[in-house]
Image (cartoon, helix red, strand yellow):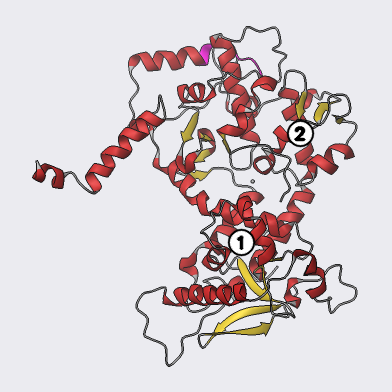
């Protein structure tokens, strides 16, 4: 018995547990239907979401910087526990975030010059894509039964759809020919209601219909076909193939059709519900969305209460991952070998952020790209111990940041209202705003913290109620023009 226990302890026993938990936690999803490329995408997004949460706090500030006293009050917004330190998160990504000192020697967190360039570029992209955002918002309302949805529900999909951060306070009021906000009649307990004021038949065309017309993918009745795929190792039985064939031959009810008089629990209506999810996912930036956000639209889109079960029944069209503690739904036809087939400007900006987050490019005091030359540097001293690991420079940076944090906690931290008194004025009086380069940036030399003046010129208080968003460049670091 002892030998059996030793034989199955460790890795082998852990793998058995993972397989059992995976099949029991997700009913209808077996290990055979798992696809590693989608699971890998969810793993990659875990650190990215925390970085984006901190970025969302910084971009709301006029100078894109926050003191550590203010950051401590917003710990829950980023998802950090009480034992976690902001300094650990900041020092983990030195090419994205930078530490600054003001005239009173208080620490502030801001963006590195490379990350600030991407933030400015993303802000310009949101502004230039406002017409596309209005079009997406109109299509979202056109698919609903009554052509009206509460604003907090739409706010949950704001980042996925690429809507501006102020869409709920500015954009919906700027286009009265398309939208009408109902807040006095219905009250504001659950947020205002956004209603569609004009119907556009040219927008009532799904992405699936457009693709079917281009490729001639229709069934015997002339309805568009869903594009399906399965893992290479998965083999369909005869019964499963017949079920897929019947599903494709059923009548196609457009997501923009009026379905108030349709019977809900029918195979034809289920195909309509699948078409709604397909259309929503096709409008998202990364062709994926958290399932929790979709469950809030059950009433507006007449979706089933067992939404997860319906999605898993159609695993040829969608893929569901539970990594990260939440269900993420992917549109499979938009991906090939773990990569988006059609990349847009938003995807390029995200990839550049991911490259800045990659610590493996941080060697010898600078990143592998020319755009990263102004990152926090670490120099080896003569008296220092010889490096033990490849990333000893990065470990030295973390140790220094912790030392700065410990020294700062012993003194009095600045209050949030004192921020305007310690910010420097811009040198150029014609400049629109003061850059964070007017603060003193922290660099690391000889194992101590020195302060070098950086003279380089250079989301959102969400309405959501979800529990669950032009320097020289090299080919590795692409900036949009």
Viewer-closest of 307 and 241: 307
Count the labels in the image: 2
Q: Is residue 137 magenta?
A: no
Q: Is residue 373 above or below residue 300?
A: below
Please say whether residue 208 is visible from this viewpoint. Answer: no
Q: State the residue lying farthest toward the bottom.
A: 382
Q: Position of residue 150 (x, y in %)?
A: 76, 29
Q: CA distance from mark 1 to mark 2?
A: 35 Å
Residue labelled with disc 1: 478
**Corner quadrant of residue 93:** bottom right
On the picture, is 186 further left or further right than 468? right
**1 or 2: tag closer to the N-terminus:** 2
Q: Is residue 122 above or below residue 15?
A: below
Quadrant assignment for the N terminus:
top left
On the picture, is 110 further left or further right than 431? left
> Which residue lies at the image location 61% right of the left edge and 10% below the top edge?
264
Q: Position of residue 22 (x, y in %)?
A: 37, 34
The disc placed on residue 458 is none
Q: Is residue 158 above or below residue 257?
A: below
Residue labelled with disc 2: 151
**Corner quadrant of residue 407:** bottom right
Magenta residues (range): 248-254
Quadrant assignment for the C terminus:
bottom right
> Which residue lies at the image location 75% right of the left edge and 80% below the top edge?
103
Q: Position of residue 29 (x, y in %)?
A: 39, 28
**Corner quadrant of residue 187:** top right
> Which residue lies at the image location 81% right of the left edge and 71% below the top edge?
434
Q: Position of residue 395 (x, y in %)?
A: 45, 73
Main structural element of the magenta stretch: helix, strand or loop? loop
What secondary structure is marked by label 2?
A: helix
């Amino acid at each position: 018995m002892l030998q059996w226990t030793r034989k199955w302890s460790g890795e082998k026993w852990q793998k058995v547990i993972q397989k059992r938990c995976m099949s029991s936690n997700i009913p209808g999803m077996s290990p055979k239907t798992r696809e590693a490329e989608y699971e890998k995408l969810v793993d990659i997004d875990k650190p990215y979401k925390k970085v984006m949460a901190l970025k969302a706090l910084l971009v709301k500030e006029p100078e894109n910087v926050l003191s550590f006293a203010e950051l401590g009050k917003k710990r829950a917004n980023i998802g950090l526990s009480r034992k976690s330190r902001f300094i650990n998160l900041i020092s983990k990504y030195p090419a994205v975030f930078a530490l600054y000192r003001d005239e009173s020697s208080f620490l502030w967190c801001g963006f590195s010059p490379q990350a600030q360039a991407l933030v400015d570029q993303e802000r310009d992209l949101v502004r230039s894509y406002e017409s596309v955002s209005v079009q997406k918002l109109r299509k979202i309302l056109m698919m609903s039964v009554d052509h009206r949805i509460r604003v907090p529900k739409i706010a949950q999909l704001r980042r996925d759809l690429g809507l501006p951060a102020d869409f709920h306070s500015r954009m919906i009021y700027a286009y009265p020919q398309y939208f009408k906000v109902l807040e006095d009649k219905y009250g504001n307990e659950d947020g205002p209601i956004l209603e569609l004021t004009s119907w556009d038949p040219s927008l009532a065309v799904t992405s699936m219909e457009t693709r079917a017309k281009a490729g001639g993918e229709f069934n015997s009745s002339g309805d568009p076909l869903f594009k399906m795929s399965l893992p290479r190792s998965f083999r369909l039985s005869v019964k499963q193939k017949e079920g897929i064939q019947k599903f494709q031959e059923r009548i196609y009810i457009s997501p923009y059709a009026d379905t108030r008089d349709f019977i809900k629990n029918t195979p034809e209506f289920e195909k309509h519900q699948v078409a709604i999810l397909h259309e929503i996912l096709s409008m998202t930036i990364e062709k994926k969305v958290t399932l929790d956000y979709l469950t809030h639209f059950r009433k507006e889109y007449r979706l089933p209460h067992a939404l997860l079960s319906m999605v898993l029944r159609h695993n040829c069209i969608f893929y569901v991952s539970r990594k990260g503690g939440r269900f993420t739904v992917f549109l499979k036809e938009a991906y090939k070998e773990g990569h988006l087939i059609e990349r847009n400007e938003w995807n390029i900006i995200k990839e550049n952020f991911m490259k800045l987050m990659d610590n493996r490019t941080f060697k010898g005091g600078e990143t592998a790209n020319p755009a990263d030359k102004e990152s926090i540097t670490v120099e080896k001293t003569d008296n220092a111990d010889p490096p033990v690991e490849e990333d000893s420079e990065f470990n030295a940076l973390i140790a220094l940041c912790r030392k700065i944090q410990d020294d700062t906690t012993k003194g009095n931290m600045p209050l949030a209202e004192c921020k305007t008194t310690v910010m420097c004025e811009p040198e150029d009086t014609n400049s629109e705003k003061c850059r964070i380069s007017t603060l003193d940036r922290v660099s690391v030399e000889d194992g101590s913290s020195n302060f070098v003046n950086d003279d380089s010129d250079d989301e959102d208080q969400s309405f959501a109620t979800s529990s669950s968003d032009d320097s020289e460049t090299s080919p590795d670091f692409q900036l949009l023009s």
